[in-house]
Image: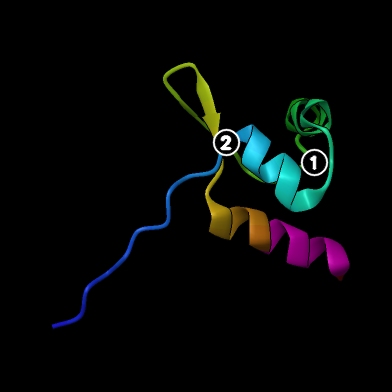
Amino acid sequence: MSVRTIEPLWTAEDVSVYLGVPVSTLYQWRYRRTGPRASRVGRHLRYNPADVRAWLAKQAD
């Protein structure tokens, strides 16, 4: 039996550190629809780490 581990969603601060950009840049990208996909969880913005990694890989192309 395999055990699945679920990676927690990232905050804007987590993504900011991962990408090395200010949080304000993430909000600008979200407004312009150019950054990694994010979702609202209540009033909080959350990022799926897999989506962030996929977006970053696409930027390298």
Residue 45: name its quadrant: top right
Do the residues bearing badges 2 and 1 touch, measured as CB atoms within 8 Å? no
Q: Does the magenta stretch include residue 12?
A: no
Residue nearer the viewer, 11 or 51: 11
The image shows residue 20 at horizontal and vertical percentages of 83, 47
Give me the disc on residue 61.
none
Which circle, 2 or 1, is nearer the viewer?
Answer: 2
Q: Mark 1 points at which residue?
A: 34
Q: Quadrant of the N terminus?
A: bottom left
The image shows residue 55 at horizontal and vertical percentages of 71, 57
Q: What range is drawn magenta here?
A: 54-60
Q: Name the residue under label 2.
A: 11
Query: In the current view of this chain or complex, which residue is farthest to the bottom?
Result: 1
Left or right: 29, with 11 as reference point: right
The image shows residue 26 at horizontal and vertical percentages of 76, 33
Left or right: 55, with 5 as reference point: right
Which kind of residue does numbered mark 2 sit on?
A: Thr
Left or right: 3, with 40 as reference point: left
The image shows residue 61 at horizontal and vertical percentages of 86, 71
Which kind of residue does numbered mark 1 sit on?
A: Thr
